[in-house]
Amino acid sequence: MKRLYTLFLLALTGTVSALAQWNTNATPVCIYSAAGHGDYYATSLKAVRTPDKKTWLAWKTWNKKEVKGIERDAVETYLQLLDYNGVPQFSEPILVNDHITTTWWSDYGLQVAADGSAIVTVADGRAEEADIPDDMDHADGFSPAIYKIDQEGNFLWGLDGVEYPEYGNAAFTNCYVVGNDTYFIFYNTTFDDTGVAEDMTDIGTFIQRVNDDGTTAWEHPRKWTEEFMQPQIVPSTDGEFLLFDKSPDGSVVHRLNRDLEEVWGEPVIYDEYKYDGYALNQYKLVPDGEGGAAVSFVRPMGQFSHNIRVQHVYADGSLGFGLTGLDAVNTEDNDYDYCGIAVNPLTREILVDFEAQLPNSYDVMLQKFSFDGDYLYDDLGISIAQKSRNNAYAFGRVGIGSQANGDWIVAYRDVQAYGANTSFIIRRYDKDANRIWTRTIGRNLDPSSITFIVEEHAAYLFYRESSDNKNPGVTIFRIATDGTYNMDDLTHITTAQEGGEQTATTYFSLDGKRLDQPRKGLTLERTADGTVRKLMR
C-alpha cells in the first residue's frame, strides 16, 4: 500500500563536505562523490539559477526500495540548493520522489519559480506499488507528478506533489514557468501485452497549468496532440507565451494565452524543415528579450550530412530570417552537427555554436546573426578550434552566453580519448570575434549531463563525472567573466545566507512544510538516521 506520510529527505550514501564551495582555481569541485557507487549514481544532472544568485541542482540515482517485503529497483530524483558561495544548503539532499521505479530511465524537468523555489517533474511507479506482483523487482509504469519545493526544503504542493497516477506510461515529463504559473507537460501511452494501444484517449502529449498555490487550472490535463511531442515554451508579453513544436508541414510556433487558446488564430510555420530525435537534432530555444525567441536545430542533408537551421520569431509572429529560416553555414558541402544558441538583447544579436566535420579537420564553429537575419560572421561562419581529422576524437560543444557590451563567453570540450582525457575550454570573445582570454578547465575528465550558464559577471559549469574517473560525482565550477575565479569583488553580493541546514531532528507538517518545532495536532518527525514517525500533541 502506498505510504501516505513519508518524508522525502533521505541521505545519499555519498557525503558532502560542509566546506564545499566554488573553486578558487581552474580545478572543478566535486561536491558529491560517486566513488564506489557505480555508473547509475547522480545521472541526468540538471541545474538552474535562482533570482537571488543561488543554484538548484537535481539528479537521479538508482537505489533499492522495500515494497511488500521485497527490495525493488527505485530510480530516485534528488535536489540540492547551493548558496552564492557554492555551499550546499541541505546537509542531506532532498529526496523528491520516494517510489518504486522501472529500471528504464525516464526524463524529468527542473525549473525555478519566480520566488526562487524549485519546480521538479518526475515519472515513477507510484500507481503500481499496491498491486505489483511479488515476482517483479521493478515497476513497468510511469505516473507523472510535479513538485514545488522552497529554499527551506518545504514541499509546497504536498509530499507527493500534484500527481496523475491514472496516466500509467508518461516517461517523459517537463515543465515551464510563465509568470506565477507552471505548465506541466508529459507524454503518455498505454499498451497491452500485444503492443497495441488499449485506449487511444490516453495517448498523446498532455499539458496542465499549475497555479502558484498548487491548484490546477483544469480538472484534467489537456491533450495537446496525439503524437509524441516535446514542446518547449518561452514566456512572451501580456502573460502569454510561445510554444514551439513540429507538424507535418514543418516546425511551428504557437502564441497561447494562459488557457492554451491560440492568440494568432493558428500557428506560424517558421521553417519548412522539422527537427527530430533527442540529442543530435533537438531544437534549442532562447528568449530574445522582446517577447519573441531565437531557435536552432539540426536539419538533415542527405543520408549522413547535416546543417544548423536558425530562425528568429518576433512576439507578433513575424519571422526575422524569412519564411524558411537560414542555415548557419551557407553551404551543403560539409557536415555540421549539434548546436546551441544565445541572444544578446541589448545588441539584438543571435549567436550559434556547433560542431563541424570539414574535409581535413574537426572544428568548433560560431555564427552570428542580427535579429533580422543578417550574417555577421561571414555566411560560412568562423572556426574557433580545429584539429586534424587524423585525430580519432573531435571537439564537443558545451554552450555560449552573452555579455552586455557585446562580448560572448563560449565553452567546448577538447576530447583526446574515449571516456577520459577531456578538458573544458572556456573563452571570451569580443563582438568582432577577437579572443580576449582562454582558460583550460580540469584535466582527464569524463563529463556528462553538462549545464553551462552564463551571467553578466560569471559563467557556471555543472556536470556529472564518470564513476570510472579518479574524482567522480556531482561537480561544479565557476569562472568570473574577466577570466579570474574570485567573485566577491565583482558582484558585491552577500555571501552565505543562513537557513536551510537540516538538523538532527526535523519537523514537517503533513503537506510538506518545514516547522521549527512540533505543533498541536499531527506532526511528522524525521531523525538523522532517516526514521520518520508521526507525533500527536
Image: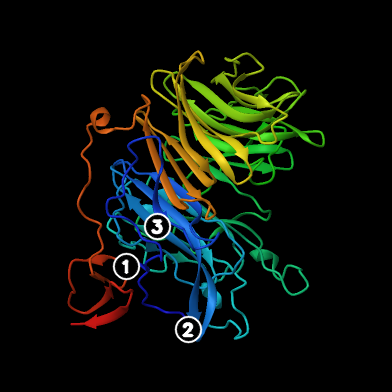
Q: What colour scheme governs how the chains and residues are painted in the rendered image of this protein? A: rainbow
User: Which residue position holds label 2?
Assistant: 1
User: Mark 3 or mark 1, which is nearer the start of the sequence?
Assistant: 3
Q: Nearer the viewer, mark 2 or mark 3?
A: 3
User: Mark 2 or mark 1, which is nearer the start of the sequence?
Assistant: 2
**Residue beneath the point at 63% across and 41% down:** 417
Tell me the CA gap for discs 1 and 3.
15 Å
The image shows residue 507, relative to residue 114, as above or below, that is below
User: Mark 3 or mark 2, which is nearer the start of the sequence?
Assistant: 2
Secondary structure under the numbered disc 1 in the rendered image: loop
In percent of width and height, residue 496 lies at: 22, 46
Callouts 2 and 3 close, C-beta under 8 Å: no
Q: Nearer the viewer, mark 1 or mark 3?
A: 3
Q: Which mark is residue 512?
A: 1
In percent of width and height, residue 497 lies at: 21, 48
The image shows residue 243, relative to residue 341, as above or below, that is below
